[in-house]
Amino acid sequence: MTELAKKSQASVLENLDSVRAMIKRHKRNDILFSIIGLIALMIGLLTLCTLFIDLVMDGYPRFNIDFLSNFPSRRAAKAGLLSAWVGSLLVMTVTFLTAVPMGVAAGLYLEEYAKKGWFSDLIEINVSNLAGVPSIVYGLLALGLFVYGLGLGQSILTAGLTLGLLILPIVIVSTRESIRAIPIAIREAAYAVGATKWQVVKDHVLKYSQGGILTGVIIGMARALGETAPVITIGALTFIAFLPPSPLTEAAPFINFDWLTSGFTVLPIQMFNWLSRPDHAFHINAAATGAIIIVVTLLMNGTAIYLRYQIRKNIKW
Amino acid sequence: MANVTTPIKAESRDLNFFYSNGMQALKSVNMPLYENKITALIGPSGCGKSTFLRCFNRMHDLYPGNKYQGQIIMQPDNTNILEPGVDPIEVRMRISMVFQKPNPFPKSIYENVAYGLRVRGEKNKRIVDDKVEEALKGAAIWNETKDRLHDLAFNLSGGQQQRLCIARALATDPEIMLFDEPTSALDPIATANIEELMSELRNKLTILVVTHNMQQAARVSDYTAYMYLGELIEYGDTDMIFTRPTRKETEDYITGKFG
């Protein structure tokens, strides 16, 4: 080996050492960041877990079927959630039936039919803004519009419509986003065989975006389930020992709409009511209710994730 | 260069095209498509060949602000398919298209091919079944798919997906089929299959194909057009264009001095 070659070999080895040292330094930063990230994640997650475990432990004595089948009562141990969960269920039904068709139609219109321009930009900004409006403002709006303006009273219908308005932006935004995710190539393929706009929308756009829309709807519903402020504003009752008339009847026509105008309470309000009592025994009820609301919300979000996965499984762009 | 014995299927006359941003992408293009022949469009990226192809099925109508000027006359009915009074949907029912990347719908193989018929309101299952089979056979993919018609189209390989897209375009018996760089996303074997298929399809319909690949144009086409900056520089028999081009620009491009 010549002197020159030896020298250059030495410099290569030296250089290699410094490269290795540099890689090591950079890897340290990797580890450092992943630790910081993990801590940040844990703070959020552990807080929620602690809260949930605390609620479960406090509310533990109430976890039995009586708690779900009893009306509220002056005696904490006999008080139950019956009117609250039935109320929540009925209000959610109205919310679903109003927010989904309106939200999907609005999102579809904005994405597929509306001319793009300053006006559609303005609408877009407003819809995004609506998603951030405090829920109590929706309550005030509903009090003026639905309760007094339209004379719907302090009813299930009013509450359902209010919460429907509240989650409308969520449904619109998720509809638009999942429509936008459909590649142009797929639309063009459909148009190229001679499909009309409505055929493209019905056979393709809606079909392929339903996973995303559904996720948005369920997440919106989970939010509506836990909303308290707007429902209080429109005057939900806090102590109710009766059920609204059943939507299904034994005699024809088997469907009855009287429940829409009935007074009601919902889960978070029942919880709030028990929490404001001085007697500690009621706080146990409140904790149990809180745990139930969290579990139902988690279940709804879990279902959303599962359904999205199931639907997306067959779609690869 | 015009072939006296072959009738013209469609012809562009003084065709100008403007995108919504005002850019003129086609400048007074005059070109015939001979019936049952393959015409290839070659030229460097951005020369307007895809823009020209997409005029034939009014794809540009999907995006607001695009403007056509001039005519594309289709035979035998002598219709100017660019005329505002002619419904683009009618045009797309007569002229189908195969895209650059295979773009099957996220539906079954069967439903992909049947979609063109469904759009036309065909409900009779027997007719749809027959047409689907015929189209899949026509696209040389029947043997691979006949036992799995209800599988998702995405489970096919890239080359099979592209042949499925050809079957989809074929199912409605179009008069002209447009191919927009149909093999640019495929491997050499799949490319050879598609090219062979195009030669066979020539017996049934008229083909216009945009290609990036000069050898492909030389292999499959009967006529070749060289475009540059939105203008049709030269058009003629494929043999002529590749052996004795009359224009210097064409020669520079096909010999690889440019592009």
Image (cartoon, rainbow, N blue to C red):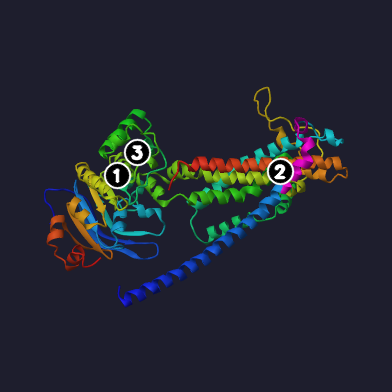
Local secondary structure at mark 2: helix
Task: Name the amino acid type tagged 2.
Answer: Ala
Pointer 2: what residue?
Answer: A159
B207 within the magenta span = no
Q: Which mark is residue B113?
A: 3
Question: To which chain does the residue with label 1 belong?
Answer: B
Q: Nearer the viewer, mark 2 or mark 3?
A: 3
Task: Name the amino acid type tagged 1.
Answer: Arg
Local secondary structure at mark 1: helix
Q: Nearer the viewer, mark 2 or mark 1?
A: 2
Q: Nearer the viewer, mark 3 or mark 1?
A: 3
Local secondary structure at mark 3: helix
Extent of the magenta region: A50-68
Pointer 1: what residue?
Answer: B94
* Separation of residues labelled 2 and 3 (CA atoms): 48 Å
Work out which residue is located at the far bottom of the displayed protein and give it: A4
Relative to residue A190, is residue A75 drawn left or right? right
